[in-house]
Amino acid sequence: MRHRAMKRIDLKSHEEVIQQFFLALPPDPEGSVVELNGKAVARITPLNAVAAEKCEDGTAWSDLKNARRCELVDREIEGTLLPHEVVELALLQQQMLTERRRLAPVALNDLRRLHQELLAKAELAGNGNQ
């Protein structure tokens, strides 16, 4: 059985009432099934909830996982990513970010101090031009 790539639907191109419907759906990590007259017409799976799950096989981040993540990113860009691969990519992305934070945590205090210095310099430069 051959799977087709998942179709993306941009809600911005639809009426406000449709956008609000999707935004009002109750968040459920397991996802939801939208029904009409007792018939399932759509399944909603929140990507953030899926991505937050821990790796089921308990393995650490590896070059093999990163290669698979890169392959899936390429397929997403090409528009050939399959529905089950969307979930896999979200999980691999989350694992990669977790590993990156573990290996190279961002020094937020240093960044905040630099930001304040740059703001002060920009203010001085702006005052000098008046």
Image (spheres, rainbow, N blue to C red):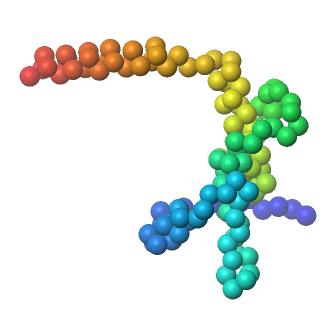
The N terminus is located in which quarter? bottom right
Whether residue 63 is visible:
yes
Residue 97 x, y percent position in the rendering: 66, 31
Task: Determine the residue positioned at 21% across, 20% down.
Answer: 123
Farthest right residue?
A: 1
Residue 114 x, y percent position in the rendering: 39, 15
Task: Determine the residue positioned at 19% across, 16% down.
Answer: 124
Whether residue 72 is visible:
no
Q: Quadrant of residue 55?
A: top right
Q: Quadrant of residue 70?
A: top right
Farthest left residue?
A: 130
| Apparent side of residue 81 relative to residue 115 in the rendered image (left or right) | right
Task: Determine the residue positioned at 46% across, 72% down.
Answer: 17
Residue 41 drawn above or below residue 32: below
Residue 47 drawn above or below residue 33: above
| Apparent side of residue 29 relative to residue 113 in the rendered image (left or right) | right
Task: Determine the residue positioned at 64% across, 24% down.
Answer: 101
Residue 53 x, y percent position in the rendering: 75, 42
The C terminus is located in which quarter? top left
| Apparent side of residue 113 relative to residue 6 in the rendered image (left or right) | left
Number of residue marks = 0
